[in-house]
Image (spheres, rainbow, N blue to C red):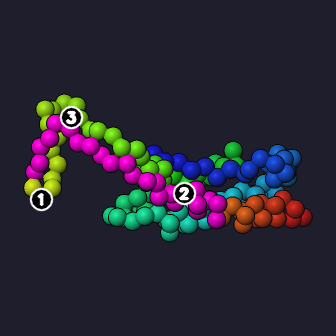
Amino acid sequence: MAVFTVKVPEGELSKAIRQISAWDGKTRLRVEGALKRGTNDVAREARQRVPVRTGKLKKSIKTRFSTVKLEGQVYSHVPYAHLVEFGSRAHTVKPQKKKALRFFRGGPVFTKRSRIPAQSGKPFFKPAYDYVEPQLIREVKKAIQEP
């Protein structure tokens, strides 16, 4: 499962969030709201940027938010999401329990091993976060500074 976590970056913003006192509930709620909106914006942007073949990967992009950690996550539960994001190097596949691999190329083909070529990555999570990050930081700063 590919998971991309949206956290407040280290620096002045992180220090400001740590300084929110437990009794200042309104500020914390404003920050939570800003981070939730930012997490949803990253997911929306990732869905727009993901390469589409069947649409399964695009539909699998979800979000979750932890109010305790002030952390949002954008993730995909399909097992090949990380391969699309980062790519993969060339490798050979061999059967594990049978004598041959079976796949279709116009009809059934059997082989003892199959060479899988390298695939370049087509990032969609990281560019989506990079696009939303400045707006997210502005909104969190604004939520902290509001009276």
Residue 96 vertical position relative to residue 24 in the rendered view, above or below: above
Residue at 20 percent across and 38 percent down: it is 113
Quick one: quadrant of the N terminus? Answer: top left
Nearer to me, 10 or 69: 10
The kind of secondary structure element at disc 1 is loop
Instruction: Where is residue 82? Give x, y as percent.
Output: 46, 48
Please give the residue where the numbered disc 1 appears in the rendered image.
106
Residue 103 vertical position relative to residue 141 in the rendered view, above or below: above
Range of magenta residues: 108-131
Residue 39 vertical position relative to residue 7 in the rendered view, above or below: below
Q: Tell me if 124 is positioned left or right of 17 in this view.
A: left
Alpha-carbon distance for marks 3 and 1?
Answer: 21 Å
Alpha-carbon distance for marks 2 and 3?
Answer: 33 Å
Alpha-carbon distance for marks 1 and 2?
Answer: 35 Å
Please give the residue where the numbered disc 2 appears in the rendered image.
125
Residue at 82 percent across and 61 percent down: it is 141
Quarter-of-image position of residue 135: bottom right
Q: Residue furthest left?
A: 107
Residue flagged by tag 3: what amino acid is it? Pro
Instruction: Where is residue 48? Give x, y as percent.
Output: 50, 69
Please give the residue where the numbered disc 3 appears in the rendered image.
95
